[in-house]
Amino acid sequence: MGRILRLGYSPCPNDTFIFFALAEGLINTAPYHFEVSLADVEMLNQQARQRVLDMTKVSISAVLHLLDDYCLLRSGGAIGRGCGPLVVARERLTVEELRDKRIATPGQLTTAHLLLQMTEAHQGSWVAMPFHRIMKAVATGEVDAGVIIHEGRFTYPAMGLHRVLDLGEWWESETGLPLPLGGILIRRDLGAETARFVDHKIRESLSYSMAHPDKAWPYIKAHAQEMAEDVIGRHVETFVNDFSLDVGEDGEQAIRFLLKAAAKQQGLSIPQKMIFWDEHLK
């Protein structure tokens, strides 16, 4: 079977599209065997803090807390433009009216939560909950507003919700950079050669799905939490792009900028360790 590498990612269509061929054994990964587990992104963030997995998808904002044990790969992440989290409410609110409301976010370590803090538009209470619960919590009045991610940006109008603030638009207007939402971490102690190998295999897996989307579709749909097919398609189109193959210079700059902003926001310093596995090779 080969040496086992434990890999975690979310059930969201962009992740299942990227990792389909790797998870289903459609590309050669010898001498390694990938053992895959899927979980909500905040759970993956927390598991990374406990070093549960060898490689895992995490929120970029969580990377600040994980650099002692992990570094970033260059492939498999979620970076882009026009793909940021949205703040939605049951009532039509202005940004000023949002200030003291009770807001649900997908978790304290998520990039969505960090962006809300960075805008300084909200000074009230917040509660963390799995992203798939947030829109219902807003619609039923459990919370006043919510920060929605993933497919929520396409489906919130159907629940009678109203957009208050597009956090991606805010980020792009403030920085001019693409928004780095998530990335793939790998344990430092696995070494550079393993990181190089995994980076290559993630790109190979994504290239397979790009060439054979019809083959990837059943796997994506099986994990898509009963999402409508048109929403799944829009999700993949929005969150899978050239940055998914390689972060590139713009993506790397965006990640470094966001980590500095996260450190400032939380009163922390960035650990003096390389962020990407191959920095020492440049």
Image: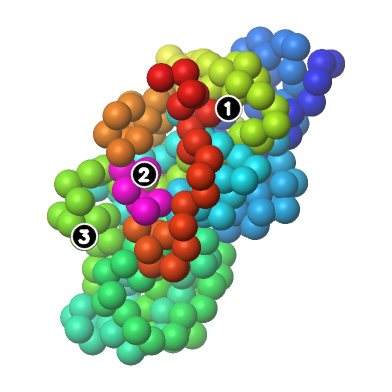
Q: Secondary structure at mark 2?
A: helix
Nearest the eye: 199 or 136? 199
Give whichever of discs 1 and 2 has the lower sequence position.
Answer: 1
Asked whether, in this view, residue 20 is left or right of residue 164, the answer is: right
- Residue 25 in which image quadrant: top right
Disc number for residue 29:
none
Q: Secondary structure at mark 3?
A: helix
Which residue is the site of mark 2? 256
**Pointer 1 local density, CA inside 10 Å: few below 14, some 14–19, many at least 20:** many
The C terminus lies in quadrant:
top left
Quarter of the rendering containing residue 11: top right
Q: Amino acid at mark 1?
A: Phe
Residue 214 at x, y percent in the picture: 48, 22
Q: Work out whether mark 1 precedes mark 3 in sequence or the reverse, and give the earlier one.
A: 1
Magenta stretch in the rendered image:
254-260
> In the image, which is nearer the foreground, mark 1 or mark 3?
3
Q: Does residue 219 sit above or below 69 in this rendering?
A: above
Q: Secondary structure at mark 1?
A: helix
Q: Quadrant of the N terminus?
A: top right
Dots 1 and 2: beta carbons under 8 Å? no
Q: Which residue is mark 1?
A: 20
**Residue extending farthest bottom:** 100
Kindly check if marks 2 and 3 are in contact, taking CB atoms under 8 A apart as contact.
Answer: no
The answer for how far apart the CA atoms under marks 2 and 3 are is: 18 Å
On the image, numbered disc 3 is attached to which residue? 170
23 and 198: which one is in front?
A: 198
Q: Earlier in the sequence, mark 2 or mark 3?
A: 3
